[in-house]
C-alpha cells in the first residue's frame, strides 16, 4: 500500500481527490485479486487514508 498511499498524497497536493475513497466499496466480480491463498478481501480504504496522512506528514511540501 506504500506506493498507493504516496500517489494519493501527490494527488491531494495537486488539488484533486480520489472519489472512490469516499464511497463504500462494493465487490464487483470482475475486480478481484487472486493469489496463492485464494481471493483477497477488499482493500481497506481507512488504512489507506491513514497511511496517506502519515506519508504526507513525512514528505516535505
Image: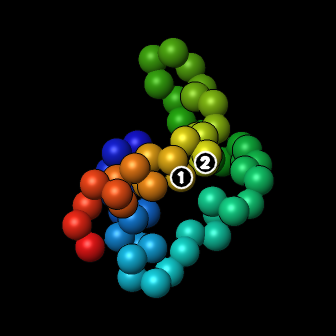
Single out the residue that lies furthest toward the left: 60
Label 2–label 1 contact, CB within 8 A: yes
Using a 10 Å C-alpha cutoff, classify the residue at mark 2 as few (fewer than 14 neighbours), some (14 to 19) or many (20 or more).
some
40 or 44, nearer to the observer: 44
Using a 10 Å C-alpha cutoff, classify the residue at mark 1 as few (fewer than 14 neighbours), some (14 to 19) or many (20 or more).
some
Q: Residue at x 56, y 69 (%)?
A: 18
Residue on which the image places disc 1: 49
Secondary structure under tag 1 reads helix
The circle on residue 7 is none
Screen quadrant of the C terminus: bottom left
Residue on which the image places disc 2: 45
44 relative to 28 in the view: left or right: left
32 or 22, nearer to the observer: 22
Q: Is residue 11 above or below residue 45?
A: below
Secondary structure under tag 2 reads helix
Tell me residue 24's x, y (percent): 77, 53
Amino acid at each position: 500500500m506504500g506506493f498507493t498511499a504516496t500517489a494519493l498524497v501527490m494527488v491531494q497536493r495537486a488539488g484533486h481527490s480520489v472519489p472512490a475513497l469516499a464511497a463504500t466499496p462494493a465487490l464487483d466480480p470482475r475486480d478481484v485479486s487472486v493469489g496463492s491463498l485464494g481471493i483477497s478481501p477488499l482493500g481497506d480504504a481507512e488504512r489507506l487514508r491513514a497511511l496517506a496522512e502519515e506519508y504526507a506528514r513525512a514528505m516535505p511540501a
